[in-house]
């Protein structure tokens, strides 16, 4: 799985002109899924996201996690995170899971983040045409790939 994690002061997702989900202070997580992703990846990533120390402590140092600050999470599926751009100008999405496989992993990731955060997270709608809005706080943007756990 590949994720882009953004610290936000607010974020929302709109579908068909209606707000589906919105959060205040917390994390907007864009999630790309590939066929080789498994339950170990889900468990590792859920813990990593909820324990990332990217929120300021009393001294203004990024030393606290979303869980420690009582923040929220908005999770959005985004197959384009697996775009291959080496050849030509049209990205290839061959590495991204097909919807029938990816939806299962996406639902497992939602469940894992609910557990790791200790409260329900907000989501987009898998496969929908979504309009995502955010105010990136910092800006802080982190890229995580479960196949490269450095």
Image (cartoon, helix red, strand yellow):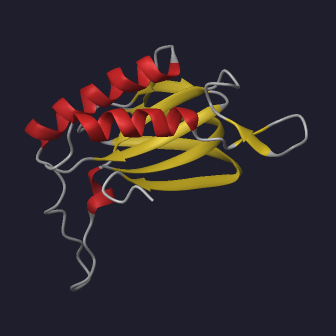
In x, y percent, where is residue 73? Answer: 52, 29
Q: Residue at x 57, y 47 (%)?
A: 6
Front residue of 47 and 102: 47
Picture quadrant where residue 23 is located:
top right
Using residue 25 as the reference point, say whether residue 101 is left or right of it: left
Viewer-closest of 65 and 93: 65
Left or right position of 69 against 4: right
In the depicted structure, whether residue 60 falls above or below residue 125: below
Outermost residue toward the top? 119
Left or right: residue 33 compared with residue 98: right
Q: Relative to 70, does residue 40 appear above or below in the rendering?
A: below
Residue most extreme to the right: 59
Q: Position of residue 88 (x, y in %)?
A: 22, 86
Question: Which x, y percent locates residue 150?
Answer: 45, 59
* Position of residue 99 measured from the top left corner of the image (x, y, whole percent): 13, 41
The residue nearer to you, when weighing 121 against 145, is 145
Q: Nearer the viewer, residue 34 or 88?
A: 34
Report the residue at 51% width, 15% height from top: 118
Q: Residue at x 32, y 48 (%)?
A: 78
Pick out the residue farthest to the bottom. Answer: 88
The answer to which quarter of the image holds residue 66 is top right
């Amino acid at each position: 799985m590949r994720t882009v994690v953004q610290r936000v002061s607010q974020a929302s997702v709109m579908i068909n002109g209606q707000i589906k989900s919105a959060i205040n202070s917390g994390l907007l997580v864009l999630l790309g899924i590939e066929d080789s992703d498994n339950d170990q990846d889900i468990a590792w990533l859920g813990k990593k996201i909820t324990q990332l120390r990217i929120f300021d402590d009393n001294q203004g140092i990024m030393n606290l996690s979303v869980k420690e600050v009582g923040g929220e999470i908005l999770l959005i599926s985004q197959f384009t995170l697996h775009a291959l751009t080496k050849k030509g100008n049209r990205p290839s999405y061959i590495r991204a899971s097909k919807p029938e496989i990816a939806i299962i992993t996406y639902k497992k990731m939602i469940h894992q983040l609910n557990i790791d955060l200790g409260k329900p997270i907000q989501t987009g709608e898998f496969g929908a045409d979504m309009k995502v809005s955010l105010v990136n706080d910092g800006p802080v943007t982190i890229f995580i790939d479960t196949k490269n756990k450095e």
